[in-house]
Image (spheres, rainbow, N blue to C red):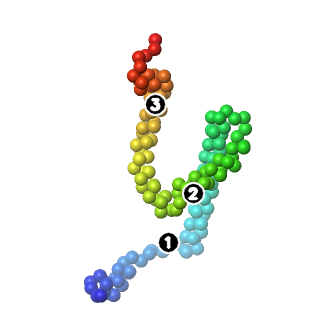
Amino acid sequence: MHGPLTDPDVRVIASGSSKIIPFGDEVHCTWIEVLVATIWFISIYYRVTVFYYISIIGIAQVLELKDYRFLTLPLGAILVVFALVTRPNVAYSFEFLQAYTAFAPIIGIFFRYYCLLLQLYGKNEIINLLTLSPKSA
């Protein structure tokens, strides 16, 4: 099939207009990409480690435990299973992120105002407002 878009002359013109302009030496660009990927990998590792440590310390404090170390292995196993169940592949992760970005600002704003209400009025005042019971003197 030949037409204006499949003509060989058109393809040559189109490929000539989309040439990549070389930036520096190929070796330097590859080295920079490897350096950036390494820094990114190390920073993600430390970020996950810090969040994991904070969550274990928080759970130990909520449960009023004296030591947090025995929680590390069970919580780690639960997180691995949870990660594999909730994100089976990369395509599903991208689909989830599209839906999440729509709801994240709403949830973030609602949660902040809810915390502000708790701080300003106190827990008992909020419960009295929600149950419509008269205030105690």
Which residue is drawn at the image coordinates 42% and 51% (left, top)? 101
Counting residues from the N terminus, which is met first, the one under dot 3 or under dot 2?
Answer: 2
Counting residues from the N terminus, which is met first, the one under dot 3 or under dot 1?
Answer: 1
Q: Are marks 3 and 1 in contact (CB under 8 Å)?
A: no
* Type of amino acid at the residue the image marks with label 3: Leu
Instruction: Where is residue 40? Give x, y as percent.
Output: 58, 58
Q: Do the residues labelled 3 and 2 touch (CB within 8 Å)?
A: no
Which residue is drawn at the image coordinates 36% and 78% (left, top)? 17
Instruction: Where is residue 7? Give x, y as percent.
Output: 31, 86
User: Judging from the image, what secondary structure is the residue with disc 1 in?
Assistant: loop
State the CA–CA distance, disc 3 to disc 1. Answer: 51 Å
Of the pair 116 and 86, the residue shown nearer to us:
86
* Type of amino acid at the residue the image marks with label 2: Leu
* Type of amino acid at the residue the image marks with label 1: Phe
Which residue in the protein does label 1 denote? 23
State the CA–CA distance, disc 1 to disc 2. Answer: 40 Å
Is residue 28 shown left or right of residue 103? right
Q: Nearer the viewer, mark 1 or mark 2?
A: 2
Which residue is drawn at the image coordinates 65% and 47% (left, top)? 75
Which residue in the protein does label 2 denote? 84
Answer whether residue 30 is visible to the viewer in this image: yes
